[in-house]
Amino acid sequence: QVQLVESGGGLVQPGGSLRLSCAASGGVFSSYDMGWYRQALGKQRDLVAAISSGGTTTYGYSVKGRFTISRDNAKNTVYLQMNSLKPEDTAVYYCMVGKYWGQGTQVTVSS
């Protein structure tokens, strides 16, 4: 059974940093695209960042220059380093690996 487990969310002050992790198990994922999406209250789920199996990255406009996505295929893990966090980054963040989704982790940016 494929399972994605997210971690690293929490409460942080504006300007702070968090690092999200998503570890996949139960399969082979080296050829899968990986990504992070987020959904704030009252809003649709939007792409935050994505990384292909070859390492090509894509970022949403609002996070470009502040967030960095990376992957470690040996650990079946995708990461999202979030710097210079803003209140508008507050959302539930979901990891995606191929067709699979993580359970979501809450990120709250507030003073």
Image (cartoon, rainbow, N blue to C red):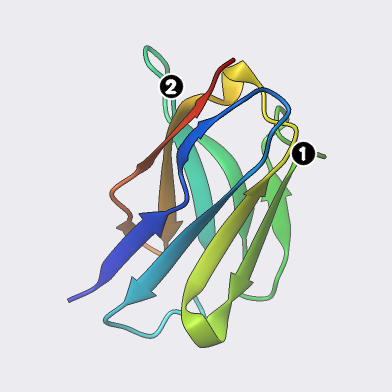
Residue in view at x 37 percent, y 12 percent: 42
Q: First in sequence, mark 1 or 2: give its number.
A: 2
Q: Amino acid at mark 2?
A: Ala
Residue 60 at what x, y percent from top left?
A: 67, 36
Q: Is residue 58 above or below residue 17?
A: below
Q: Would residue 1 be found to the left or right of residue 59 on screen?
A: left
Residue 30 in view in this figure: no
Q: Is residue 27 above or below residue 14?
A: below
Asked whether 18 or 39 is in front, the reply is 18
Residue in view at x 37 percent, y 72 percent: 24
Q: Is residue 94 above or below residue 22?
A: above
Kindly state the secondary structure of the residue where label 1 is placed. loop
* Residue 97 location, quadrant: bottom left
Q: Would residue 22 be found to the left or right of residue 73 on screen?
A: left
Instruction: Give the residue number, with chain letter if any, for mark 2.
Output: 40
Residue 73 at what x, y percent from top left?
A: 55, 82
Residue in view at x 71 percent, y 34 percent: 63
What numbered label is drawn on residue 66?
1
